Amino acid sequence: MPNSLIQNLTKSEAKNAIYLDFEGNLNKPPTYAGTVVDASYSGTFFEPIFESVAKNKKLELSTLRTFSEEIVHRAQTEKRVILAWSKHELGLLDQLTPEITKHYRDANKLVMKFFKEKRKPTIKNLKKQIKDKKEKGEWGSARIGLKDLLKLDYVDYNYPSHLNDFSPGTALREVRNQLENKKPLYKNLHPRAKKNLNDLITYNEHDCRGMQHLIEYVFDRRPTEDSISY
């Protein structure tokens, strides 16, 4: 994966960007990707066993390679950048389509630079909360995440409370296991698995839309600047 990425983002690029987020399990290729472009959300499954799920939810079924080629082609032809919440997404795609690096921006670094500079008490408080949870043995990320920022009152994003403790990886494992142990049809899934799928899609959409909201939040607080950087 390239060490050097374009490190700035303009307001125009942010408005027209492809906001991307993957869901999956550790040590496995991603199972699902969602994108938001021009306020429209779409999702794609990559595992063939999820074919009936994709059909039921009116989502796409593809391969990671095809998805990667298509998203880069769209970025190229429509002159868009691709924004994701880390280099993780880039690491999944750049071996398939190396030209993605020309379009890729790390939303995490762009947003976190602003919070570290302008919202220092918030960062300090969030780090303390993470440390306290770890000391209590509670599950959670070791770093400040997208969800942590979206749930801040002053960020003014309506994050669904029922997703606070949702684990997309756990949900995907449960659904995959049921599809493997039965006929791989959506109608055969347990109601809990169907709910997990709905929550997974909603969770992913909020990751994409929430990322866009935070980028806009930063630009709104830098009204005289046409670009932000890290």
Image (cartoon, rainbow, N blue to C red):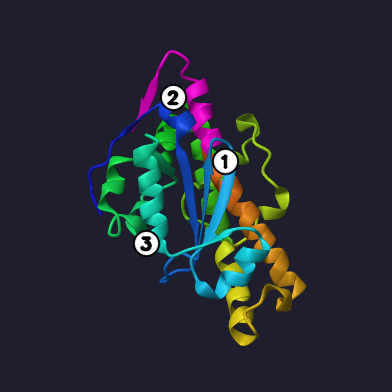
Q: Earlier in the sequence, mark 3 or mark 2?
A: 2
Pair 3/2: label in front: 3
Pair 2/1: label in front: 2
Q: Which of marks 2 and 1 is nearer the N terminus?
A: 2
Q: Is mark 2 on a helix, strand or loop?
A: helix
Q: In this view, does 77 lie to the left or right of 194?
A: left
The answer to which quarter of the image holds residue 154 is top right
Circle 3 residues within 10 Å: few <14, some 14–19, many ≥20 = some
Residue at image x 64%, y 84%?
183
Q: Does the magenta stretch include residue 36?
A: no
Circle 1 residues within 10 Å: few <14, some 14–19, many ≥20 = many
Amino acid type of the residue that numbered disc 2 sits on in the rendered structure? Lys
- Residue where numbered disc 2 is placed: 11
- Residue where numbered disc 1 is placed: 210
Residue at image x 62%, y 86%?
181
Residues under labels 3 and 2: Cα distance?
30 Å
Amino acid type of the residue that numbered disc 3 sits on in the rendered structure? Arg
Pair 1/3: label in front: 3
Image marks 2 and 1: residues in contact by CB distance under 8 Å = no
- Residue where numbered disc 3 is placed: 65
Q: Give the range drawn in magenta.
A: 212-230
Say whether residue 65 is visible.
Answer: yes
Q: Is residue 227 magenta?
A: yes
Relative depth, front residue between 195 and 74: 74
Q: Earlier in the sequence, mark 1 or mark 3?
A: 3
- Relative to 33, say whether 137 is above or below: below
Residues under labels 2 and 1: Cα distance?
17 Å
> For the view shown, which residue lies furthest in the top direction?
224
Residue at image x 42%, y 40%?
107
- Relative to 226, say whether 134 is above or below: below
